[in-house]
Image (tube, grey):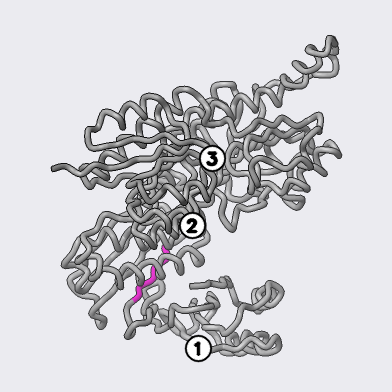
Amino acid sequence: MSNIYHILIADQISKKGIAELRSVAQFKIDEKYGLKENELSQIIADYDAVIVRSQTKITRKVIESGKKLKVIGRAGVGIDNVDVDAATEHGIVVMNTPGGNTIATAEHTLSLLLALARNVPQAHVSMQLGEWKRKNFEGIELYGKVLGILGLGRVGREVAKRALAFGMKVKCFDPYLSPTKVKNLQIELVNSLDELFPAIDFLSLHAPLTAETEGIINKENLKKCKQGIRIINCARGGLICVADLAEFLKSGWVAGAALDVYEPEPPPADFPLRGLPNVILTPHLAASTVEAQENVGTEIAVMITDVLCHNIIRNAVNMPSIDPKVLSILSPYMALGEKLGIFMSQWIVDRIDTLNIYYSGRANEYDTSPITRAVLKGLLRKVAGKEVNEVNVMFLINTLGIEVQEVKMSSGGEFTEIIGIEAKTDEQTYQAASTFYGKSHRLVQLNFNPIEASMEGILLLLENKDRPGIVGKVGTILGEHNINIAAMSLARAKAKEKAISILNLDNVPPSEVLEQIRKVEDIYNVRLISV
């Protein structure tokens, strides 16, 4: 007899999505909306799967109460309302629908851009009050203006296409996007925020929320913008330091802002932007179209069916599809590969075009794609934050236009087991290789030169001319600030040429210490790396 699966729909999804689920004979469907944590915790034990949008919170308490729970489906992109770590710990698959609302979000961004340029909401309110104040609402044309896009993922590219149709020029900053990805898109890819901000009339945010991007629209960066800039955010509320933006809006330096997302949601009553005449606020409407909701509703329904009835997992954010026995063998290699990826992400400063990941040893007896995914997960952690995982990492890599190749070598030289990375950028090639040393991880090659360094803790990487005294000066600077060197390794091709030194430190040097080291003669590059 077939299993009967109980599915809870905790937030409203499209009728087509619900009909899709009800058409499956093995499913028993309940719709219960507006449940709080305690209410959900009391009933979740009866269900094999739960579907939410953004309202219902699937907390650790709920997950720990879900003794039968196998799948959490998020009809939408973000998973901020799901405790993914707790779900992973309990063997529960978490899935989302990353592509279903791309067009809706792009169109809403353009709606806000147009409304901001022509003061549409303010003029509407004035007319409703019986006024006729045409001169008060004089706007600007989009034609010929420059739109800056921060983050050129799915939504960012769709916004760019529409802006170009209005005759705008588009500049983009995305430090992890390959230049070849935008070669045919009529988009200018700039190399820094310092280059982007002074050159644009409008700024649209489409970056994920990470440690690097949180509060990126702040006082310091707003000063770099030309006076009269207008800012649109349909991505993540945490990208903007709201108090700083309010100050620049009141002064007139920022001509206007249009926001659809907030941190937290809903924004509090004393939200600093509320009531400002040059601000447009919408209640997280970017994905709220009939089409988008139908797309994500039917997509999550099909995905839930595939998991429960066919054991097919798609768009999981926390679980690769690997046989458990093989996983136990590959896990050490995956840990080593992820550590190497984390190291490379903090060393490489240029955009990556191609990436070769090569293996030798026992790993070659198996499908190495799970190891490759772990390497890429480490490499992209800096750009994608917690949202990157073994399942969605290939999608993110493709979005960035980075070409990835796996290479299996018959021999790793003097080492039995090797995982290596060769990353090519416009400027140069970065190469590193790693192996096991007992249970610890070691770097054994940098830029094709031998080295022996522990990949644990805090690493200070120096690129310098190979001459006497440099390391001594660095050691003196660190010693003067009570920073202890635990170990040191050197990689070089020839004496008196370029060398790479790695110092394992016991504690993190302050930024002023790093700046002091950068000023040492013949040091070309200083990178602080945490692994």
Q: Quadrant of the N terminus?
A: top left
202 relative to 410, above or below: above
As helix, strand or loop, the secondary structure at mark 1 comes to strand
Residue positioned most to the left? 1
As helix, strand or loop, the secondary structure at mark 3 comes to loop
Which region of the structure is painted magenta? 429-434
Viewer-closest of 525 and 421: 421
Image quadrant where residue 281 sits:
top right
Q: Which residue is mark 3?
A: 55
Nearer the observer, disc 3 or disc 2?
2
Residue 212 x, y percent position in the rendering: 59, 57
Give the side of residue 69 with respect to residue 146, left or right.
left
The first of marks 1 and 2 along the sequence is 2
Crowding at mark 3 (Cα within 10 Å: few <14, some 14-19, many 20+)? some
113 relative to 518, above or below: above
Q: CA distance from mark 3 to mark 2?
A: 17 Å
Residue 387 x, y percent position in the rendering: 47, 52
Viewer-closest of 171 and 436: 436
Residue at 61%, 26% (x, y): give it: 168
Q: Which residue is mark 2?
A: 61
Q: Is residue 289 something that shows in the picture?
A: yes
The first of marks 1 and 3 along the sequence is 3
Nearer the observer, disc 1 or disc 3?
3
Please tell me whether residue 49 belongs to the stretch shown in magenta. Answer: no
- The majority secondary structure of the magenta stretch comes to strand
Could you tell me if the residues under marks 1 and 3 are in contact, i.e. CB atoms within 8 Å? no
Q: Which residue is mark 1?
A: 487
Q: What's under tag 1, amino acid-wise?
A: Ala
Q: What's under tag 2, amino acid-wise?
A: Lys
Q: CA distance from mark 1 to mark 2?
A: 44 Å
